[in-house]
Image (cartoon, rainbow, N blue to C red):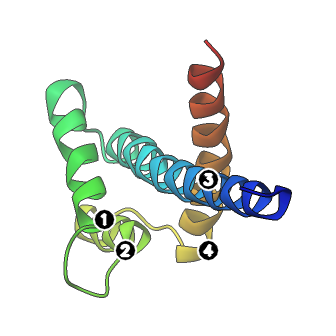
Amino acid sequence: MNAFDDREKAYEAKFRLDQEMDFKAKIRRDKLLGLWAAEKMGIGGDAAKTYALSVVDVEFDASDRDAGHKIAHDFIAAGIVMEEREIRHQMAVLLEIAREQIYTEMAR
């Protein structure tokens, strides 16, 4: 194998790792988002954890909805007034937190 092949394999491995990290970070973000939303709706304990998992499940649904749409819909149903852009902002913040958590866990 020559240096070019080695470099190509390294890039492919990095690409796969980056894709895996993105996937894990989005799942973690959705769980954190679900816990945040549960708190806003006054849901606590095991019910909050169950709700957070339902937010994660939305990403695996065949529908066009995502976690942000679910939260927005659930907030409306709960009588909570919050613009979708605020939810999207929270998703961005939580994505960074999720990434930091995952990188910290990997460094151990």
**In the rendered structure, are the residues bearing label 4 and label 1 in contact, judged by CB atoms less than 8 Å apart?**
no
Give me the C-alpha separation between circle 3 and circle 2.
29 Å
Quadrant location, the C terminus:
top right
Give me the C-alpha separation between circle 3 and circle 1.
47 Å
* Mark 3 vs 2, N-terminal side: 3
Q: Tell which of 48 and 27 is nearer to you.
A: 27
Question: Local crowd at mark 2 within 10 Å, few (<14), some, or many (≥20)?
Answer: some
In this image, 31 relative to 11: left or right? left
User: Across the whole image, how many numbered discs are drawn on residues?
Assistant: 4
* Mark 3 vs 4, N-terminal side: 3
Give me the C-alpha separation between circle 1 and circle 2.
20 Å
Query: Residue at 45% of width from left, 67% of height from top?
Result: 81
Q: Tell which of 104 and 81 is nearer to you.
A: 104
Question: Local crowd at mark 1 within 10 Å, few (<14), some, or many (≥20)?
Answer: few
Query: Residue at 65% of width from left, 62% of height from top?
Result: 89
Instruction: Say which residue label 4 marks.
Output: 85
Give residue 101's position: percent from left, percent from top: 59, 29
Question: Local crowd at mark 3 within 10 Å, few (<14), some, or many (≥20)?
Answer: few
Q: Quadrant of residue 9?
A: bottom right
Instruction: Say which residue label 1 marks.
Output: 79
Amino acid beneath label 4? Arg
Amino acid beneath label 2? Asp
Instruction: Say which residue label 2 marks.
Output: 66
* Mark 1 vs 2, N-terminal side: 2
Give residue 64's position: percent from left, percent from top: 31, 88
* Mark 4 vs 1, N-terminal side: 1
* Mark 3 vs 1, N-terminal side: 3
Instruction: Say which residue label 3 marks.
Output: 13
Q: Tell which of 75 and 46 is nearer to you.
A: 46
Mark 3 or mark 4, whichever is nearer to me:
3
Amino acid beneath label 3? Ala
